[in-house]
Amino acid sequence: MRPLVLALGFSLGCSLLFAALVAAQGRRGVPRAVREALVGCWVPWEGERWEITRQGETGLRARITYPDREALRARFRLRGTPRPHRASLTWVEEREQAQLACGPTTQHGQFCALRVDEEGELEVALYARGWGRNRRRGRLVDTVRPRRCE
């Protein structure tokens, strides 16, 4: 009986600690209006396609594929074949944006910030993470207004 109580107490304590850490970082589920605007299929750049779907009650998940590999190779000077991958979107409250690991997996440290403007249009900013002391801050590389898939 005692080991079970200890295990349950430890599990509850870890859950509360994780919830406190998430709250301290200002991250929570994506707001409903933003979720409704983001769900669907998007083409942010030629050669890259995002299929954003709901995940649970307040989350979003993206499946990133590369249907036009020649355009992608020209953009990144890639070798080989970029693999499709999945990523969860993280809501950053203080910036009012969702963040997503985007681009080919060969582009380490690259992420996109997704924001819905006043007119309901999606705006994407591509960041590259630095190295050394500025590793946590991203450097703005490009901004685009993606179009819906056909």
Image (spheres, grey):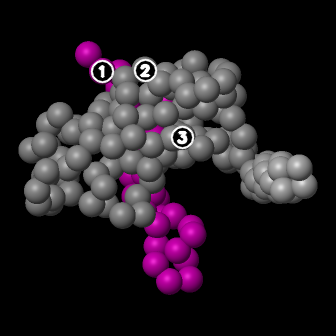
Residue 114 rendering spot, x and y as whole percentages: 52, 39
Among the 4 quarters of the image, the one containing residue 43:
top left
Tell me: 71 left or right of 17.
left
Tell me: 31 left or right of 145.
right
Q: Amino acid at mark 2?
A: Gly
Give the residues drawn in magenta, as a range: 122-150
Residue 44 rendering spot, x and y as whole percentages: 34, 36
Disc 3 crowd rating (10 Å Cα; few below 14, some 14-19, many 20+) is: many
Q: Residue at x 45, y 43 (%)?
A: 87
The residue that label 1 is drawn on is 149
Mark 1 vs 3, N-terminal side:
3
User: Residue placed farthest to the bottom in the image?
Assistant: 132
Given contact means CB atoms under 8 Å apart, are the residues at marks 2 and 3 in contact?
no
Mark 2 vs 3, N-terminal side:
2
Q: Residue at x 56, y 37 (%)?
A: 115
Mark 2 vs 1, N-terminal side:
2
Given contact means CB atoms under 8 Å apart, are the residues at marks 2 and 1 in contact?
yes
Spatial CA distance of label 2 from label 3 is: 14 Å
- Per the image, is 129 magenta? yes
The residue that label 3 is drawn on is 89
Q: Is residue 117 visible?
A: no
Q: Nearer the viewer, residue 82 or 47?
A: 82
Among the 4 quarters of the image, the one containing residue 7:
bottom right
The residue that label 2 is drawn on is 40
Tell me: 116 left or right of 28.
left
